[in-house]
């Protein structure tokens, strides 16, 4: 199958509403051959295709890494390159895909969790320039989603890598998706130090759209703030 035909076939599969059907059908293809079309689908114009490609990365890359861990690392380094200014791109969907992959693979999570966290951090003083702060709100949304996805399985790794160091920035974002995901992440990680900031958002009724395991959920910042406070009580 040519590259163009493969890409068209993968886009067609990712349009299915049922994630389990998509993942079942992806097993018919070589995992490595799926990488290129999946990367292109991260910035597809259809929301369902974009998010299903994120979920597909969580199946494909761990499968590659289980066969050869270095091949898995190569994909992770490609993610990092796409978020590098020198790449010339923006890296749409990359933080989400990184979080999805690491939630499904222990070794990759151990080796790259600090890099995902670094995208919340500023450079800091000389000798401690370990931050790669993402300034675009759309990228911040993806980053917080990726961190939430990792928190499902690797809460300890995120806390160890100082994920709480700069989360206060996101609670005052002009974008409701960022505020809501900051609440959600804080609740999932048990970060009680943010209770006061979360409480200020209990009456914030701006919309938030969440993706989880193939499904979309429309809610409000206030819903996520109250859920977080319940986790922190």
Image (cartoon, rainbow, N blue to C red):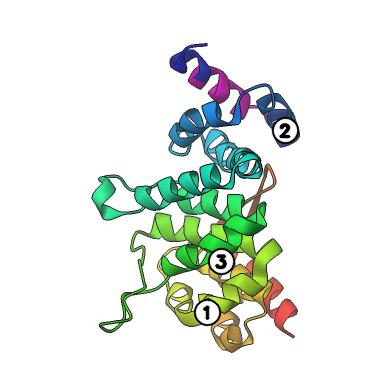
Instruction: Assess disc 1: are there few (<14), some (14-19) or many (≥20) residues with their C-alpha within 10 Å of its C-alpha.
Output: some
Q: Nearer the viewer, residue 73 or 48?
A: 73
Return the x and y of residue 10 as percentages of the image width and height: 56, 24
Label whose residue precedes the other's in the sequence (2 or 1): 2
Q: Residue at x 33, y 81 (%)?
A: 128
Residue 60 in picture, x, y percent from top left: 61, 38
Where is mark 1, residue-wise? 164
Judge whether 6 appears above or below 166 on screen. Answer: above
Left/right placement of residue 138 relative to residue 205 reads: left
Q: Secondary structure at mark 1?
A: helix
The structure residue drawn at horizontal position 52% and vertical position 79%, both measured from the top left corner, is: 164
Read off the magenta span: 7-17
Q: Is residue 203 visible?
A: no
Which residue is disc 3 drawn over?
180
The reply to whether the magenta stretch includes residue 227 is no
Query: Which mark, by number, is residue 191?
Result: none
Q: Earlier in the sequence, mark 3 or mark 1?
A: 1
The residue sitting at 70% across, 24% down in the picture is 25
Q: Is residue 87 left or right of residue 25?
A: left
Q: Which residue is mark 2?
A: 18
| Residue 224 higher or lower than 192, as above or below | above
> Which is nearer the eye, 180 or 193?
193
Mark-to-mark CA distance, 3 and 2: 26 Å
Q: How far is disc 2 from disc 1 in space, using C-alphas?
A: 35 Å
| Mark 2 crowd level (few <14, some 14–19, many ≥20, 10 Å Cα) | some
Query: Looking at the image, is mark 3 or mark 2 nearer the viewer?
Result: 2
Quadrant location, the C terminus: bottom right
SS at badge 2: loop
């Amino acid at each position: 199958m040519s590259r163009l035909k493969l890409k068209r076939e993968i886009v067609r599969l990712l349009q299915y509403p049922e994630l389990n059907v998509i993942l079942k059908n992806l097993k018919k293809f070589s995992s490595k051959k799926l990488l290129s079309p999946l990367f292109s689908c991260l910035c597809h114009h259809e929301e369902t295709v974009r998010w299903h490609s994120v979920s597909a990365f969580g199946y494909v890359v761990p499968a590659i890494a289980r066969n050869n861990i270095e091949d898995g690392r190569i994909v992770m380094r490609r993610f990092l390159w796409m978020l590098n200014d020198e790449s010339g791109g923006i890296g749409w969907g990359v933080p989400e895909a990184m979080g999805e992959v690491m939630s499904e693979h222990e070794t990759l999570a151990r080796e790259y969790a600090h890099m995902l966290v670094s995208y919340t951090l500023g450079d800091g003083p000389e000798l401690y320039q370990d931050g790669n702060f993402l300034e675009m709100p759309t990228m911040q949304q993806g980053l917080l989603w990726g961190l939430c996805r990792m928190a499902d399985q690797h809460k300890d790794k995120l806390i160890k890598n100082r994920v709480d160091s700069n989360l206060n920035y996101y609670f005052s974002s002009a974008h409701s998706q960022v505020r809501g995901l900051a609440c959600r992440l804080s609740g999932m990680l048990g970060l009680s130090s943010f209770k006061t900031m979360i409480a200020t958002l209990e009456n914030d009724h701006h919309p938030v759209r969440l993706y989880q395991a193939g499904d979309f959920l429309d809610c409000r910042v206030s819903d996520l703030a109250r859920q977080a406070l319940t986790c922190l009580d």
